[in-house]
């Protein structure tokens, strides 16, 4: 499709500037005060001739979820009244930059063909990919039918329920296909699920000079940590049949406890993350983890435990109904990148599950390297290779033409 390639090449400098502008507005989550980024994105989209809907999630709902502001965006471009609707979703929220950067995390600096900045790869890059793919279709004049929607959302880091989940629950969209932010060298058709829990161990604080008068919650936490990490040995034997996904695993990501060095800790809080392969049943997984915690704590005299579920994100399995979309992405990605582009699963959990739970066929594809690690996503010096951005934009545009082409 040389016409599309020419339009994307002609617009590419503007596409890079568009991405730089998005990287320069922080969207650290937490704290999750992301409405300003949505409004800046809306300005940029309006300048390109798109009509932008701003959907503000009520403040009370946002605050209850632990964030400060969420405004989701929808762009709808209809070619004809009839025909399918293809949605393109990317999230603007991202973890804080952390330490170790050698480039400004909000600078959008370009060095040796790489654009640096927090969310440059995951996934503000696909705000640019999807916007400029749609712009090329508009400018091409090709006889297309149906519609394209851009869903730019701001709650992926906290589970997506106030991003795509909120748009879907409010009846604001129901596309026939979905493409979600991803990387360029594989078409992802499945992903892990995730259970996150907060475990609070209660003992009895006492003066460190009289430890026998207290009940040490930290010693109980140490015993529980040993049991949880031993549980990973069991999980490594439960292998997934989905390429790209290996086995379930559990991680303890945060520990808080104690009040001072001279006080026996009376309370310790653990936050854990249990990844679930597509073959697992989430209810059974949660019951298993709860039983492990309860049985371990029962062996600690004087300790009580509270267990709170923070997140239950279901996995996504490959869907037969997504085959036309997956085939088109593979075909065009292989042609544009000059190598076979496989399908794969990913151990991440994504907002795609919120669409597939409603029966919407979906695939994950966008601008980026072969692996998450190569992009430094969630680490210092996150970056995007600009050649990947340009080629992925063409892949998305060509795929949309396949799905929206008027019958001959």
Image (spheres, helix red, strand yellow):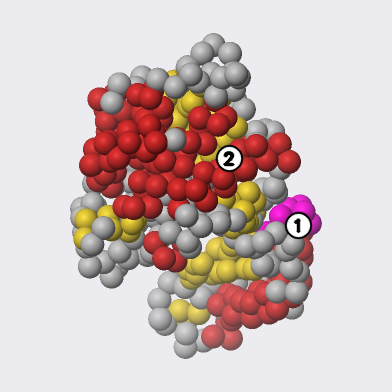
Q: Residues within 10 Å of mark 1 (few under 14, many from 20)?
A: some
Please identify the residue farthest to the bottom as the structure is shown. 209
User: Mark 1 or mark 2, which has the lower sequence index?
Assistant: 1
**Residue 107 appears left or right of 226:** left
Residue at left offset 58%, top offset 40%? 328
Quadrant the N terminus occupies = top left
Residue drawn at point x = 61 percent, y = 43 percent: 326
In the rendered image, which residue does mark 2 sit on?
328
**Magenta stretch in the rendered image:** 276-286
Residue at x 52% of width, y 51% of height: 334
Residue depicted at x 41% and y 27%: 137
- Badge 2 element: helix
Residue 126, magenta (yes or no): no
| Residue 282 among those drawn in magenta | yes
Q: Residue 329's x, y, as percent?
A: 55, 43
Q: Is residue 65 above or below residue 61?
A: below
> Callout 1: helix, strand or loop?
loop
Res 302 visible: no
Compare residues 70 and 150 and report the one nearer the observer. 150
Q: Quadrant of residue 38?
A: top left
> Residue 140 in the image: x percent, y percent?
38, 25
Give residue 172's position: percent from left, percent from top.
Answer: 53, 22
How many tags in the picture? Answer: 2
| Image position of 86 with respect to 198: above or below | above
- Say which residue label 1 marks: 280
Image quarter where the C terminus lies is: top right
Q: Quadrant of residue 235?
A: bottom right
């Amino acid at each position: 499709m040389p016409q599309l390639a020419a339009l994307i090449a002609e617009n590419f400098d503007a596409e890079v500037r568009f991405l730089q502008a998005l990287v320069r507005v922080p969207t650290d989550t937490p704290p999750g005060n992301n409405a300003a980024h949505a409004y800046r994105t809306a300005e940029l989209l309006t300048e390109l001739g798109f009509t932008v809907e701003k959907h503000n999630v009520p403040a009370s709902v946002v605050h209850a979820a632990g964030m400060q502001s969420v405004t989701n965006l929808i762009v709808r471009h209809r070619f004809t009244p009839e025909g399918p609707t293809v949605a393109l979703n990317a999230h603007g929220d991202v973890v804080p930059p952390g330490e170790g950067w050698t480039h400004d995390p909000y600078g959008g600096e370009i060095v040796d063909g790489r654009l640096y900045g927090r969310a440059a790869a995951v996934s503000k890059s696909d705000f640019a990919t999807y916007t400029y793919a749609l712009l090329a279709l508009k400018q091409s004049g090709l006889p297309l039918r149906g519609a394209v929607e851009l869903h730019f959302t701001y709650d992926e880091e906290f589970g997506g329920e106030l991003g795509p989940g909120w748009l879907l629950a409010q009846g604001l969209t129901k596309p026939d296909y979905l493409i979600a932010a991803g990387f360029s060298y594989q078409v992802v058709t499945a992903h892990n699920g995730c259970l996150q829990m907060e475990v609070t161990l209660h003992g009895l604080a006492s003066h460190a000079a009289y430890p026998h008068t207290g009940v040490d919650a930290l010693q109980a936490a140490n015993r529980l940590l040993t049991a949880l990490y031993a549980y990973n040995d069991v999980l490594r034997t439960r292998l997934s049949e989905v390429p790209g996904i290996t086995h379930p695993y559990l991680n303890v990501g945060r520990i808080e406890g104690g009040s001072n060095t001279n006080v026996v800790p009376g309370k310790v809080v653990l936050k854990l993350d249990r990844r679930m392969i597509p073959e697992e049943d989430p209810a059974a997984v949660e019951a298993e983890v709860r039983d492990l915690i309860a049985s371990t704590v029962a062996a600690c005299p004087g300790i009580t435990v509270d267990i709170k579920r923070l997140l239950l994100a279901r996995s996504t399995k490959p869907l037969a109904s997504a085959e036309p979309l997956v085939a088109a992405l593979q075909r065009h990605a292989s042609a544009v990148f000059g190598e076979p582009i496989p399908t794969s699963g990913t151990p991440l959990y994504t907002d795609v599950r919120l669409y597939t739970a409603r029966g919407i066929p979906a695939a994950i594809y966008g601008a980026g390297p072969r692996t998450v690690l190569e992009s430094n996503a969630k680490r210092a010096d996150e970056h995007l290779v600009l050649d990947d951005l340009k080629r992925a934009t063409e892949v998305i545009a060509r795929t949309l033409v396949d799905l929206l082409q008027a019958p001959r």
